[in-house]
Amino acid sequence: MLASIPRNHPNQRRKRGADDSVDDRETPADVFDPLNAEFKFTLDVAAARHNAKCARYYSLPPKPYANADVRQLVMFPERFVGDPDALGLDGLQQPWPSNEVVWCNPPFSDIEPWVLKASVSLATVVMLLPANRCEQPWWQKWIEPWRDDRSPNVIIETRFLAGRRCFKNRGLAITNRTSRNPPFGIVIVVWDRRPWDRKQS
């Protein structure tokens, strides 16, 4: 029997739009902590107050097809006005400067803009992505031709993690099995722009 299609699979998004509750997958500690020890992240660019992995973070953007206030209410029910702790709203519109080391677990319903931003930004960016999307146009355009020392401007490294990871929502186990344990593995993509001396420390 075929596995059920995740609710934010492209085919499902075309039918009913993205589901924020599916996109809101908190990065598992067993994935983030070793990476943070290696890279020492300074900024989480696709976060919310309840799942930010860095003290400094940007909140996710409003959907273009939904009222922004309604989405803020869904994401931050305790503060209708949005997230006062965030550095800004919409990490795609905010700067990712060269002095930052960026962590990004983007909404899986709309990955390409985040990959494009990582590709053209000045920061070192480490991004968590589903490992079953390597045939997608965004991967083939922005990652595949340049990874493994094929880019003259930045080192792009891909790390495919073993097994599948359990995600959480607001610190609690996600009840929907497909969202909690997605039917795909994880790949970590690194756009490494750190100076050589910082890589050695």
Image (spheres, rainbow, N blue to C red):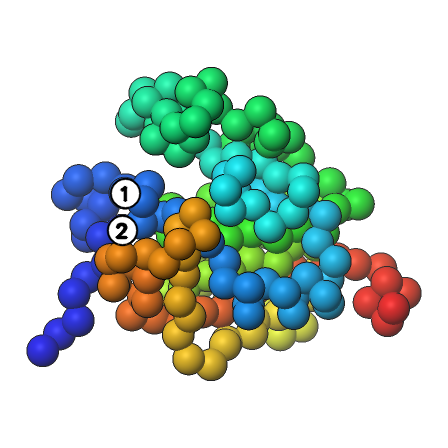
Instruction: Please indicate, yes or no, whether residue 5 appears anywhere in the rendered image.
Output: yes
Residue 93 lies left or right of residue 97; in this view the side is: left
Residue on which the image places disc 1: 19
Q: Where the C terminus falls, by quadrant?
A: bottom right
The residue lying toward the viewer, choosing from 112 and 39, is: 39
Q: x%, y% of residue 141?
A: 47, 58
At 47% from the left edge and 18% from the top edge, which residue is drawn?
81
Q: Are marks 2 and 1 in contact (CB under 8 Å)?
A: yes
Amino acid under disc 2: Asn
Name the outermost residue toward the right: 197
Residue 189 is left or right of residue 21, and the answer is: right
Crowding near the residue tagged with mark 1, few <14, some 14–19, many ≥20 C-alpha atoms within 10 Å: some
Where does the image place residue 112, in percent across and percent down from the top left? 44, 49
Quarter occupied by the N terminus: bottom left
Q: Residue at x 50, y 76 (%)?
A: 160
**Residue 145 seen in the figure:** no
In percent of width and height, residue 145 lies at 53, 66
The residue labelled by disc 2 is: 8
Residue 150: quadrant of the picture? bottom right
Q: Neighbour class for label 2 at 10 Å: few (<14), some, many (≥20)?
A: many
- Label disc, if present, on residue 7 of the rendered structure: none
Could you tell me how far apart the alpha carbons at marks 2 and 1 are, in whole angstroms?
A: 6 Å
Amino acid carrying mark 1 in the image: Asp
Classify mark 1: helix, strand or loop.
loop
Task: Decide: is 8 above or below 4.
Answer: above
Earlier sequence position, callout 2 versus callout 1: 2
Element type where label 2 sits in the image: loop
Left/right placement of residue 145 relative to residue 98 reads: left
Q: At x 82% / y 67%, what residue is drawn?
A: 199
Give the x, y percent position of residue 97.
Answer: 73, 40
Placement of 81 over or under 178, stated as above or below: above
